[in-house]
Amino acid sequence: MSENRKAAIAAALILIGFGVVAYLMPRIMLAIGEYSPWAAGTFAALFVLAFFGVFWLRARAQKKKRD
């Protein structure tokens, strides 16, 4: 399997995973919000940071692999 194909499959799986969580985000935030509005806001912020963080870490790993 070529390296580009592996990267595309990995990116697709990551996007699908985050897409499912984003689809369920309103329900998750309402459930957490019953406990604490701050916790719900923190969860949402961490979700957004994790989305970009996963791709940043993957790009770093790919760069190390090439060098």
Image: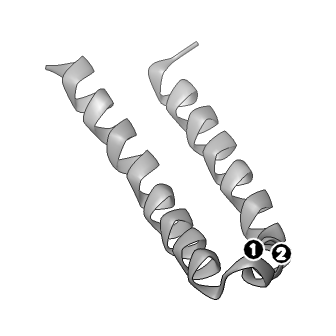
In this view, which residue lies farthest toward the bottom? 37
Front-most of residues 16 and 45: 45
Please say if the residues under marks 1 and 2 sit with CB atoms less than 8 Å apart: yes
Residue that numbered label 1 is attached to: 32
Residue 9 circle label: none
Q: Position of residue 40 (x, y in %)?
A: 64, 78
* Location of the C terminus (image quadrant): top left
Quarter-of-image position of residue 57: top left
Residue 31 circle label: 2
Q: Position of residue 32 (x, y in %)?
A: 75, 74
**Residue at image location 48% in from the left, 56% down from the top:** 50
Categorize mark 1 by other alpha carbons within 10 Å: few (<14), some (14-19), many (20+).
some
Query: Three-letter amino acid code at disc 2?
Result: Ala
* Location of the N terminus (image quadrant): top right
Categorize mark 2 by other alpha carbons within 10 Å: few (<14), some (14-19), many (20+).
few
For label 1, the SS is: helix
